[in-house]
Image (cartoon, helix red, strand yellow):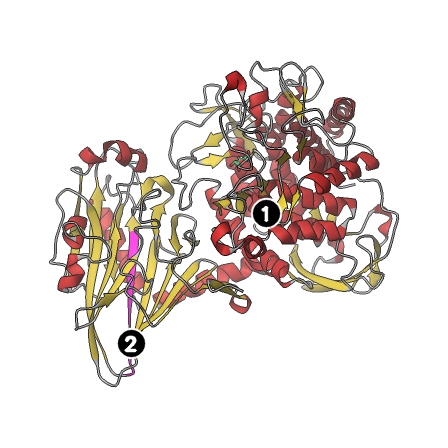
Amino acid sequence: MNDYYAFDDERRAIVVKRHDTPAPWINYLSNGTMHAFVSQAGGGFAWWKSPVVLRLTRYRQYNLPIDSPGFYVYVRTPDGTYWSPSFRPCETPLDEWSATHTGGRTRFEARKGDLAARLEFTVAPDHDVLLWDLRLENRAGAAVACDVFAYCEFSQPNWEGEAGWGYYLKLQLKTWYERSMDAVAYLYHGGHPREDDCPLMFLGSSRPADSYCGDRDAFVGQYRYERNPVAVERGACGDVDLPCGQPCGAVHNRVRITPGGSERITFFLGVAPGALVDLEAAKRAGAETLRTLRASGAVDEQFAKVAAWWDEHWGVLSCDIPDADARRQIETWTPLNTVHTGRYSRAVNTVAPGIRGIGFRDTCQDMLAVAYRKPAWASGVLSYLLTQQFEDGHVVHYAYPEERKPPLTTVHSDDHLWLPFVAHAIAAETGDVSFLDARARYLADDAAGAGGEATQWEHLLATVRFTEANLGALGIPLTHRSDWNDIIGKYNKRGRGQTVFAAQQYVVALRYLIAIAAARGDDEARAWLGDCLARQAEAIVTCAWDGAWWRRGFDDDLNPVGTHAAEAGRLYLNPQSWAVLSGVGSDDQLRVGMDAVAEHLATDVGLKILTPGFSGWGTEGGTPRGYGPGCGENGAIFCHSNTWAIMAEALLGRGARAWRYFTQIIPHVAMRTVGVERYRAEPYAWVSNIVGPENDRHGWANVTQVTGTAAWMDVAATQYLLGVRPEIAGLRIDPCIPADWPRCSVTRRWRGCELRIEVDNAAGVEKGVAELTVDGDAIDLASGPIIRPELVSGKRAVEVKVRLRSLRLPANSGLTEH
Ligand code: GLC
């Protein structure tokens, strides 16, 4: 137990009980176009489409005080004291306080004396507006008058431009009170990468403002802070327009609350597009949005829609398992996290400003968790990603769809190979492979515009052609700049380095493509892909086994990397798990590799990515550089990599170990193990990595929220541990659980039907489906425990019964359909 937070599983929420968490614990609020994150202390910022070129408000990622500014509300009582429902920025002691995050909404509840406040944030689904919904309740016997202020610091929308040129650009903007909107309006007219839709920004209230301010420095005052703004101290904003300078939005409402009564004010921070093209039209659009939202019931309706969206998202899968922490993580927090990674890739959190755009490999992986809940979303993203592929099959490394910047075109061995994973995930959920007939343009060779056109299926086959054309001397893929591991390129200075991990990933990609080719009846492609697979598997078994585990790759001189004789980086995690995922190697080798992981890489909060760590990453020329031991790719507990180890153990049928690997690294559990102050990051969001034991900061969780860990943990838990795995042919039901779970159940919405799956493990085994029935009818298990779509079609719900028994498991054939 700790005094920082408690989960409220009923409401799928976390209640944070102290504002001073060791790091900001944030929630993303979004309708897909308008976005914000808000922390437990009210810090955060808002952006429209892009956090880099359409940033609406400021957030100082590396400054002290941390986590500021944000979306601030001040409540001032007649005695001149003032406080904030989010505690920050005023930091006035309160009698009660909590912050609650749930899907798409964050709520602060606070009380000072007889005045109680509830401030709830969400982004309206139907309007590009962040709603700040405040209710004040007077619990005293006498009426109270208070002054309420909402304040945010507007940003210059082009964040990079501002960092470099803001001192000039501040003369190219203005704020004013726009009567037609009854809101503080902000127009930025500096040069802008998205001139056509650079918006009019605004902050308004549900009531006419009693005073307003558009000038940050006038609102805050000289050498003051957001904590004690002079405008709040005076009790009025002074009605300040800003002809140039540092903009803000501040709106003041005076309210009188009857004894026992309450008052509600909603503030609207929003945008109206096209302000640089037609300002009058933008004003009209803004006024219309505000008119709609000010209508009675409109705000409640928007909140209800947000809640319904999340209920629908969460409703795809639920489970009943003996472990409450695992259940909460699987049902609520991982699927919440995967929406954010689906939207933000690796780009934006409290320390990431957004300049990374969309990581190609990253977004592909993120779509694996989106695909089974929202296949249309994943399909749209896939269509876009294919436009970032060159005709020879390789792809960009980062893309900037919203920023309209040229992509980053470094060549990596893995990036393009994630495309078949996405396509397969969509096909598996929907059973449809015809979407691959749609045509997509390649990227022109100079990456400046569109090139030739081909079907999506041809695009996918091009990924194979590229890898086939880029195999090294040992027949496995050349590393290029890197594989999935950003740092591995250090072994490839002269272009001859090769990667076992990318080889194994390639095998899985081929297996997925073969399944798709079969479903498309494309025998020619199927035969060719089969040949590629056989050759690749042969190359891997010939060069990659080190005697007790799988090697990581080869350097320019074909020396093995990840070998028993090495001083550092002797054993790497990924090739052990990916050996299992690829199904290449003897059953014995696959098990022995994973046993080496258990023996050498285990800690009590997860598996290290390698051991031993390098004393400084890369010591060429005697100069150590890069990550310190136990940090990042140099021996941290790399959570993303842990997902694959969980899947590998599940494929091997070792349920106790697979579940231990999963549960120990669940943020809330890892935090309990190492302590809140050491772990620091959110107890509900996945992180990329946790500093390993070789480092004194062991236990510190890094790169929170925007990490590939989220999507893969979702896939690992739902499809490999619970074992409810969509395939093109149907839904595979193949749970892998600890032997001491007598039963468990999963409810899964699939192809329009709700499957209530009851797993009976009276036999006390870890894996092995001996019997599978759907509404009482037994399924022939000859081709695997698969529920074919015919069995659910036209039905709203079916009862599925699974009986586990000790079986001789078939030889592992990796992530495949057969
Ligand atoms: C980071 C990067 C990701 C990469 C991984 C391993 O998480 O965001 O792209 O695959 O590290 O290096």
Write the residue at 45% across / 23% down: 447
Dot label at residue 113: 2
Assign a secondary structure to mark 2. loop
Q: Nearer the viewer, residue 815 or 431?
A: 815
Left or right, 454 with reference to 562: left
Q: Report if residue 501 is visible in the image.
A: yes
* In the displayed structure image, the side of residue 50 where residue 170 appears, left or right: left
Q: Which residue: 87% across, 48% down?
A: 782
Main secondary structure found in the magenta portion: strand
Residue 384: % across, % down: 50, 36
Check the image and report above or below for 673 versus 98: above
Separation of marks 1 and 2 at Cα, in angstroms = 46 Å
Q: Amino acid at mark 2?
A: Gly
Pinpoint residue 66: horizontal percent, then vertical percent: 34, 49
Who's the residue at 46% across and 62% down the image?
4
* Vertical comparison of 293 with 187: above or below: below
Locate residue 448: give its quadrant.
Answer: top left
Q: Residues within 10 Å of mark 1 (few under 14, many from 20)?
A: many
Tag count in the figure?
2
Residue extending furthest toward the front:
696
The residue segment tinted magenta is 260-270
Q: Residue 625, position in %: x, y?
A: 49, 26
**In front of the other: 523 or 99:** 99
Ligand 1 positioned in quadrant: top right
Residues at marks 1 and 2 touching, judged by CB atoms closer than 8 Å: no
Q: Quadrant of residue 147?
A: bottom left
Q: Which residue is mark 1?
A: 369
The C terminus: image quadrant: top right
Q: Where, quadrant-wise, is the N terminus in this rendering?
A: bottom right
